[in-house]
Image (cartoon, rainbow, N blue to C red):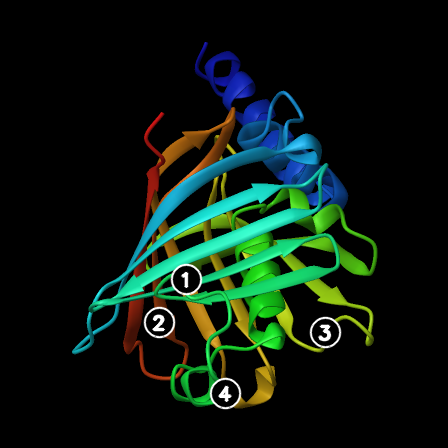
Amino acid sequence: MQIKCFVPLFIMLVAGFVYSQELTGAQLLENAIQYHDPSGNWKTFKGDFNITMEIPEKAKRESHITIDLPQQYFSVKAKTNNNLSEYIIDKDNITILFNGNKNPSKDILKTHRLSKERAKLYQNYYTYLYGLPMKLKDTGTVIHNHVENKTFKGKTYWVLKVTYDEKIGKDTWYFYFNKTTYAMEIYQFYHDETKNDGEYILLSEEETIKGIKMPKIRAWYINKDDTLLGTDILKPAEE
C-alpha cells in the first residue's frame, strides 16, 4: 500500500523534472506573452498612462506617455519642479516643447538636456520596457534556448537569457518569470557580465492598460552593491 501511494508522487516529481528540462526559451517567452498580453493587443497598442519617477534625493518626475504603434506616434510630457518638457514623435517628425514654447532657444535646450536624440531615446526606452515581454519578439532579439531554474532574493524563477544582434545592442539580459503564472517579475542586464556591472529591476503589482498586464512598480538597483537608483510607478491615465 505504501509503495502504491508513493508511485503517483514519484511520477509527479519526474514529470516536473522532465518539463523543466524540455521547456525552451521560445516556449517560456510564449507562455509569458500569453500571461501579459492574452488577446495580442500589443501589436496594435494605442493608449496612454502616467509614470511617477522617484529618485533618491531628487525631485519627483511626473510623466504622461502616449504610444500609438499603428500611427507611429509617441509623446512624453514630463514635469519636474516647475518645468514642463514635452517630446512629440509623429513618424519621422520630432517636436520639442518647453513650458509650452514650441521653439525653445539653444540655451534652454542645452540647460535642460533637450534634443531630438533624447526624444528617440525616450521613445525606445518606454516602448521597450512597457512593451515587455512582447518586445522580445522583435527582429534582432536572440532568445537563448536553455531555460535556467534560478533563485533570486529567496524565490525561484524560470530565467530567460536574451542577447541582441550587434547592430541593436551589446548588453546581456535575463528575464525572471513566475514559475506558476509566467508573470515577469524581474529583469536584469549586464554590459559586461564578468564585471557584474549593470542593473536589476524588481517588478511588483500590476496595472492593466488596454488589456495588457504591465508592472505597476519598477525598482532599479545596481548589480554590484544593491544600491537603489530609483522607482517608477505606473498609473492609468484618466479616462
Q: Quadrant of the C terminus?
A: top left
- The x, y position of residue 216, in whole percent, is 35, 43
Q: Which mark is residue 150?
A: none
- The x, y position of residue 47, in whole percent, is 52, 34
Mark sitting earlier along the chain (3/1): 3
The secondary structure type at the circle numbered 1 is strand
Residue at the disc numbered 2? 221
**Mark 4–mark 2 distance (CA, rounded to whole Å):** 34 Å
Tell whether label 2 touches label 1 (CB within 8 Å). Answer: yes
Q: Quick one: 225 or 3, which is closer to the camera? A: 225
Q: Amino acid at mark 2?
A: Tyr
- The x, y position of residue 137, in whole percent, is 75, 46
Q: Nearer the viewer, mark 3 or mark 2?
A: 3
Is any atom of residue 16 visible in this view? yes
Is 225 displayed left or right of 15 in the figure? left
Identify the residue at image location x=44%, y=15%: 2
Mark sitting earlier along the chain (3/2): 3
**Mark 3–mark 1 distance (CA, rounded to whole Å):** 19 Å
Q: Amino acid at mark 3?
A: Gly
Tell whether label 2 touches label 4 (CB within 8 Å). Answer: no
Is 164 displayed left or right of 16 in the figure? right
Q: Nearer the viewer, mark 3 or mark 1?
A: 3
Q: Amino acid at mark 4?
A: Lys
The secondary structure type at the circle numbered 2 is strand
Above or below, comparing residue 233 to residue 9 in the picture = below
